[in-house]
């Protein structure tokens, strides 16, 4: 009976906190440089790796917040459990799977293990002492690291293109968080922080489009990139203005994700323009 209850709780958690309709697009977004890269690991291995990484750290976020969530979200699966030990077991199982997928790639494995150690320190000691506005900025650091690890698995070049990708990915998650999390509207000075993040996202998107233009024959045409850059600027301004007026700006956050996804396609999908 205990085993079946645990299995039910894990499946319920998966449906509640990791719905595929939301997180599969996130995984594909992070996988763009890897999926469009020539050579390296198979696309299935890359997607499996990113799915494991995103799920592991999503679960870790929830485990780290379970005490406060029991007050704010008592209806959640984790909050209704007397013991979350089975979920730590699930976390460990997924971590082992990630290590298996990274076997033979020692630098990437070291990067992953260092990331795990850093986040362990964050959740165990540092997070509770950090201001809320800093917390979501720190937690979002994991996403560009995932991009780096997956790109290494697929033998993607580690040059300016990957650096621009990681910057845009990080800022996309940082901008999205306050746009969809209404609790962040209560933080003092949040308008200034969001304004700065939106401005940085716009710059990162513009740099991405500039790099996508390039000088080669298979680069994205300027007639496409120019309007896209203007669209990024318009969306950034509209998102910030809506954020100042309304608490729920989730649709604007989705627009930020969509435009960032298009930017990464133009940057890494040179063969699309050939």
Image: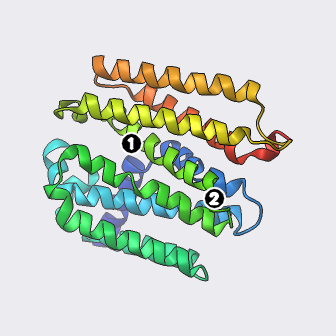
Give percent across and percent down for residue 114.
39, 74
Q: Residue at 47% across / 63% down in the picture?
A: 53
Q: Which of marks 1 and 2 precedes in the sequence? A: 2
Mark 2 vs 1: CB contact within 8 A: no
Work out whether 198 lies above or below 24: above
Give percent across and percent down for residue 38.
77, 61
User: Is residue 182 among what the camera can see?
Assistant: no
Q: How is the image coloured?
A: rainbow
Give percent across and percent down for residue 146.
50, 60
Numbered circle sitting on residue 37: none
The local secondary structure at tag 1 comes to helix
User: Is residue 4 among what the camera can see?
Assistant: yes
Q: Nearer the viewer, residue 108 or 212?
A: 212
Work out whether 98 lies above or below 13: below
Give percent across and percent down for residue 213.
72, 38
Q: Residue at 42% across / 58% down in the picture?
A: 142
The C terminus lies in quadrant: top right
Q: Nearer the viewer, residue 231 or 204?
A: 204
Q: Residue at 24% across / 43% down in the picture?
A: 133
How many residues crowd mark 2 within 10 Å: few (<14), some (14–19), many (20+)? few
How many residues crowd mark 1 within 10 Å: few (<14), some (14–19), many (20+)? many
Disc 2 versus disc 1: distance between alpha carbons?
A: 23 Å
Q: Quadrant of residue 105?
A: bottom right
The local secondary structure at tag 2 comes to loop
Work out whether 223 lies above or below 55: above
Q: Which residue is mark 2?
A: 159
Work out whether 142 lies above or below 229: below
Q: Residue at 37% across / 49% down in the picture?
A: 17
The N terminus lies in quadrant: bottom left
Q: Quadrant of residue 197?
A: top left
Horizontal side of residue 68 vs 198, given as left or right: left
Q: Which residue is mark 1?
A: 174
């Amino acid at each position: 009976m205990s085993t079946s209850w645990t299995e039910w709780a894990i499946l319920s958690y998966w449906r509640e906190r990791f719905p595929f309709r939301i997180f599969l697009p996130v995984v594909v977004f992070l996988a763009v440089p890897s999926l469009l890269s020539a050579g390296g690991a198979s696309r299935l291995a890359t997607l499996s790796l990113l799915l494991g990484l995103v799920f592991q750290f999503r679960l870790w976020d929830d485990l780290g917040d379970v005490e406060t969530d029991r007050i704010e979200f008592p209806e959640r699966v984790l909050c209704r459990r007397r013991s979350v030990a089975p979920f730590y077991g699930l976390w460990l199982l997924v971590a082992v799977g990630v290590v298996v997928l990274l076997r033979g790639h020692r630098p990437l494995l070291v990067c992953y293990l260092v990331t795990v150690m850093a986040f362990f320190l964050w959740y165990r000691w540092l997070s509770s002492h950090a201001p809320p506005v800093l917390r979501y900025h720190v937690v979002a650091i994991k996403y560009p690291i995932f991009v780096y690890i997956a790109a290494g698995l697929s033998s993607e070049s580690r040059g300016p293109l990957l650096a621009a990708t990681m910057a845009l990915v990080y800022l996309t998650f940082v901008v999205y968080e306050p746009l969809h999390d209404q609790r962040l509207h209560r933080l003092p000075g949040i308008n200034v922080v969001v304004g700065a993040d939106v401005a940085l996202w716009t710059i990162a998107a513009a740099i991405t489009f500039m790099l996508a233009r390039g000088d080669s024959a298979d680069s994205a045409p300027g007639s496409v990139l120019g309007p896209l850059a203007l669209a990024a600027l318009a969306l950034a301004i509209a998102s910030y203005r809506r954020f100042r007026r309304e608490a729920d700006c989730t649709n604007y956050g989705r627009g930020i994700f969509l435009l960032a996804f298009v930017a990464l396609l133009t940057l890494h999908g040179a063969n699309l323009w050939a």
